[in-house]
Image: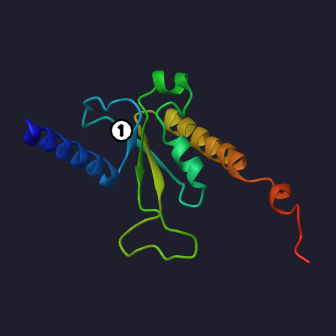
Amino acid sequence: MKQELQKAQAQATLQQMMEKLQPAAQTGPPEAKRDPNEEVYEEEVEINDYPQIARVKVMKRDALPQDLLDNSDVVWTLKGVYVPPGKKVPEGQRKLYIHIQGSNKLDVTRARAEIIRLLEEYSRDARPDAELYARYSVL
């Protein structure tokens, strides 16, 4: 009994570690089986330089408007690696970006515009007010 409990705990820990190490997070409707002849439209939005809170919020499943999700087959995937400011991008890698795919160019373009709008909005909300940090001066 004790061994089974330890095994279950080890498996749960391993699963958590694998989720953290998974390189790409995909958000959007589940991919349907595509016709190989169907045209696929793609766009990208670099998000590496936005605040972390904005990057996290925009990758949530419910970030985009429900009508865009329900009436389109747009899928967006987080790709690349986070590169801190002042650091160089590792060779063979790209800065963090969102890859958007869909079968309709208008939907892909709308999704890209909405992602950029949300990133800007969340970034404004993430900035601290200047008065909070400039209230006192050192003599």
Given the current orientation, which residue lies at the most extreme front position? 2
Quadrant (top left, top right, bottom left, bottom right) of the N terminus: top left
The residue that label 1 is drawn on is 39
How many neighbours does mark 1 have within 10 angstroms: few (below 14), some (14-19), or many (20 or more)?
few
Q: How is the image coloured?
A: rainbow
- Please tell me which residue is depicted at 86% across the width and 56% down the height of the picture: 131
**Of residues 27 and 33, the one drawn nearer to the viewer in this rendering:** 27
Residue 47: x and y in percent read: 54, 55
Q: Position of residue 128 (x, y in %)?
A: 75, 53
Foreground pick, 99 / 8: 8
Residue that appears at 58% across and 71% down: 85
Residue found farthest to the right: 139
Position above or below: 92 against 19 = below
Residue type (three-letter) at the residue carrying disc 1: Glu
Vertical order, 84 against 12 (above or below): below
Res 110 visible: yes
